[in-house]
Amino acid sequence: MHDPTRVDITPEILLKAYAAGIFPMAEDAQDPTLYWVEPKARGVLPLDGFRVSRRLARTVRLDQFEVRCDTDFAGVIDGCAAPRRDSERTWINGRIRELYGALYDLGYVHTVEVYAGGRLVGGLYGVSLGAAFFGESMFHEVRDASKVALVHLMGRLRAGHYRLADTQFVTEHLTQFGAEELPRHVYKRRLAEALDQAGDWNVWPGDGSVTGGQVLDALGGT
C-alpha cells in the first residue's frame, strides 16, 4: 500500500520511516511529491545462502571490474535514475536525490560502484541502519556490472555481520540470487532484530582493494 499524502520529509523522518518498515517513492522523476510505501510482502535477500551462479562467480573472482564504495554517490544515483530500456520512467525525482544525498553525507547511505577502464559502468545505493541494509536501486551500462555490485554488497554485509538485506520487492532479476518475500509481520520482527544490532559497513576498505576472492569467501566460498 502507499500513502500519497504530501509531507515535508526530512532525513531524520526518513530514517524513522525505515526503522518502522516504510520507505518513500515518487510516481516519476517529474512529480515533486513523495508517498510512503509499506508492502504487504517484503523482499529480502538471504545473507546465508545467497546464490551466485558459476559464471558470475568466475567474473567476480577474476576481478574483471574495479569495485569501490562511497566515492561517487552522484554518479550512482544518476545511473539509477537514467531511463531503462523497458521504461522511460524513473521514480527518482529531485527530492529523492536531496534526501538520500543528505543521508549519504551523514553516513547512512552507501554506494557500491563498479568501474571498467576507470569509467563508472554500474552500481547500487542503499540505506544502512543498525545491522539492516535497505537496497534502493541499481544500474548497469555493461553486462554483469550491477550483478557484480550486488555480490560485493552481500559479501560486505556478511563480513560486517549484518542481519537483514532488504530489497523492498522481489523481482525476477533478484530471484536468481535467492530473494524471497516475507509477510509484513515476519519482516517487522526480522527488522527489529536487525536494528538491535550493529553492522559494520567499513569492515572492508572502499578503495577498490577488496578482491573478488575475498567477497566470495565471505559468502561461503562460492
Image (cartoon, rainbow, N blue to C red):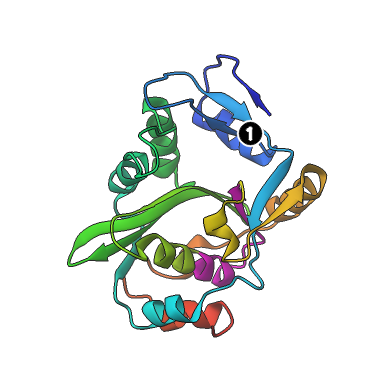
- Looking at the image, the residue that sits furthest to the top is 6
In the figure, 15 relative to 61: above or below?
above
Specify the amino acid type for callout 1.
Ala
In the figure, 166 relative to 217: above or below?
above
Q: Is residue 126 visible?
A: yes
Q: Which residues are magenta?
A: 154-168
Is residue 170 shown in magenta? no
Q: Number of callouts in the render?
A: 1
Mark 1 nearby-residue class (10 Å; few <14, some 14–19, many ≥20): some
In the figure, 7 relative to 105: above or below?
above
Residue 212, picture quadrant = bottom left
**Which x, y percent locates residue 213?**
43, 83
Left or right? Give the position of 198 relative to 89.
Answer: right
Is residue 155 shown in magenta? yes
**Which x, y percent locates residue 44?**
65, 55
**Which x, y percent locates residue 214?**
45, 81
